[in-house]
């Protein structure tokens, strides 16, 4: 993640400083070390603030605030120095008029209150007990994945599928909750980056192991292209959605994460796609997603291409689909399947 060249929001666009200049100043004010990790916290904060202001949704800042709470201790802050939020408020106070500062402060206060409510609320069993509170199979799966035991993870997935679990249930009932728990453990610093990477790599293998079970290949005679726009490296959720659509008869062209938009469009044109899936996992990825949708709309070769967007931010904030200009929005894989089925003649919808 690097600083973007320009601000997105009406409020921060009034600054005479670029995002990189504000990030420099905030790093100095907080007294953080000049490390890539510390700078990333500041840049992601500024980006989430900017995008959440533009959308007018304080809730879009909340995941960043929660992540920051955990990450803060890991970036060596000096004791007694201001946090990122306080330093940002100080810089804005220096450079913006009072009314603009006031509306930014109100927005941030709403996000902080929502984040505090998340922290205060009674933790679910998952959160309290971590791994132990996942269902037995999901806990076993995650334990294998974290330890890098890919053979065991794949054997478990195959055993469940062999015992009658559908691909849908293995993906959404076993692997997705395990990945979510992985995120919680990683966020709290209970797992290293290497353990998270290894576990996610095992998950990719486990998902590929299900591939032979994706019956109904291309039977609809319709193709789709799926990608995340530049900057977003999260692939697991998007891949789950495309696997389930493949199982329903779509010809899937998964072009991967952080794909240049020109290449996404070229792929859609090449296969004469009817559907384009674009995912975003963090608030910061939303402007890139909106830009990609704008490029689809401006390209006459893509007339008639339906755009479906989804991912974590769409689960957390409603109305975002309109902001990015998509035709369809889905917060999770089940919403995505329902939305895509809605495009088809009911007679041809295949339900595995
Ligand atoms: C694995 C992971 C990574 C891996 C991704 C590897 C890969 N190949 O996918 C790597 C290491 C790259 C990564 C990096 C980062 N990550 Co990360 N990551 C995760 C983690 C642990 C799991 C993601 C996952 O597999 N989820 C499981 C899937 C099934 O859930 P899902 O993505 O929500 O998908 C579902 C729906 O959203 C939907 N869906 C998803 N995509 C799409 C797309 C469409 C079109 C549709 C219709 C639907 C749809 O369908 C799915 C099934 O229902 C999450 C934690 C979490 N709870 O998700 C953090 C998480 C998303 N990451 C986070 C962060 C902060 C980062 C980093 C900034 C961390 C860092 N640098 O240290 C970077 C940013 C990288 C970037 N530029 O994108 C935060 C985001 C918080 C925030 N600020 O918003 C999270 C939430 C973890 C946390 N709480 O701290 N990450």
Image (cartoon, rainbow, N blue to C red):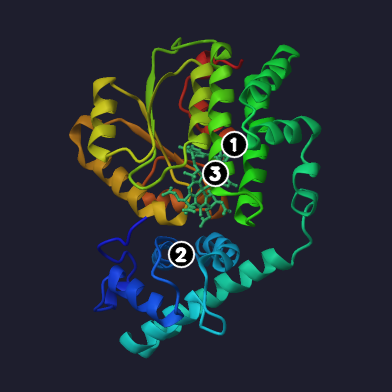
Q: In this view, does 138 lie above or below 54?
A: above
Looking at the rendered image, the disc whose residue lies closer to the viewer, 1 or 3, is 3
Q: In this view, does 299 lie to the left or right of 251?
A: left
Q: In this view, does 12 lie to the left or right of 263?
A: right
Q: Is mark 1 on a helix, strand or loop?
A: helix
Using the image as rendered, state which of residue 149 and residue 20 is in the foreground.
149
Residue 103 seen: no
The reply to whether dot 3 and dot 2 touch (C-beta < 8 Å) is: no
Residue 194, numbered label: 3
Count up the numbered dots: 3
Going from N to C along the chain, the mark reached first, 1 or 2, is 2
Residue 41, numbered label: 2
* Mark 1 beta carbon near ligand 1 (under 8 Å): yes
Return the x and y of residue 119 as percentages of the image width and height: 69, 65
Separation of marks 1 and 2 at Cα, in angstroms: 24 Å
Going from N to C along the chain, the mark reached first, 3 or 2, is 2
Going from N to C along the chain, the mark reached first, 1 or 3, is 3
Using the image as rendered, state which of residue 287 and residue 346 is in the foreground.
287
Residue at screen point 56% across, 36% down: 198
* Mark 2 beta carbon near ligand 1 (under 8 Å): no
Separation of marks 1 and 3 at Cα, in angstroms: 9 Å
In the picture, the quarter occupied by the N terminus is bottom left
Q: Is mark 2 on a helix, strand or loop?
A: helix
Q: Quadrant of residue 271?
A: top left
Separation of marks 3 and 2 at Cα, in angstroms: 19 Å
Return the x and y of residue 186 as percentages of the image width and height: 61, 51
Q: Mark 1 points at which residue?
A: 199
Residue at screen point 66% across, 53% down: 190
The reply to whether dot 1 and dot 2 touch (C-beta < 8 Å) is: no
Q: In this view, does 212 lie to the left or right of 129?
A: left
Residue at screen point 61% across, 15% down: 352
């Amino acid at each position: 993640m690097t600083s973007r060249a320009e601000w997105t929001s009406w409020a921060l666009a009034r600054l005479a400083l670029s995002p990189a200049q504000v990030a420099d100043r905030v790093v100095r004010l907080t007294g953080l070390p000049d490390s890539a990790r510390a700078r990333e916290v500041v840049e992601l904060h500024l980006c989430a603030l900017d995008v959440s202001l533009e959308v007018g949704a304080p809730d879009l800042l909340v995941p960043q605030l929660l992540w920051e709470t955990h990450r803060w201790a890991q970036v060596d802050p000096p004791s007694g120095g201001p946090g990122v939020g306080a330093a940002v408020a100080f810089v804005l106070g220096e450079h913006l008029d009072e009314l603009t500062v006031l509306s930014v402060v109100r927005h941030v206060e709403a996000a902080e209150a929502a984040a505090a409510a998340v922290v205060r609320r009674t933790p679910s069993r998952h959160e309290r007990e971590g791994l132990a509170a996942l269902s037995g199979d999901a806990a076993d799966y995650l334990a294998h994945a974290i330890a890098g035991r890919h053979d065991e993870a794949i054997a478990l997935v195959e055993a469940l599928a062999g015992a009658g679990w559908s691909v849908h249930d293995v993906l959404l009932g076993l692997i997705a909750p395990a990945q979510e728990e992985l995120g919680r453990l990683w966020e709290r610093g209970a797992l290293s980056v290497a353990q998270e990477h290894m576990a996610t790599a095992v998950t990719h293998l486990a998902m590929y192991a299900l591939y032979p079970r994706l019956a109904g290949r291309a039977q609809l005679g319709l193709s789709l292209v799926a990608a995340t726009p530049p900057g977003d490296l999260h692939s697991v959720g998007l891949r789950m959605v495309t696997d389930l659509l493949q199982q329903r008869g779509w010809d899937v062209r998964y072009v991967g994460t952080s794909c240049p938009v020109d290449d996404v469009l070229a792929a859609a044109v090449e296969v004469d796609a009817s559907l384009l899936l674009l995912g975003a996992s963090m608030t910061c990825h939303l402007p890139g997603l909106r830009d990609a949708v704008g490029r689809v709309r401006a390209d006459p070769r893509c007339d008639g291409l339906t755009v479906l967007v989804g991912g974590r931010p769409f689960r957390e904030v409603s109305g975002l689909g309109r902001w990015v200009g998509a035709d369809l929005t889905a917060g999770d894989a089940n919403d995505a399947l329902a939305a895509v089925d809605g495009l088809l003649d009911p007679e041809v919808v295949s339900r595995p």
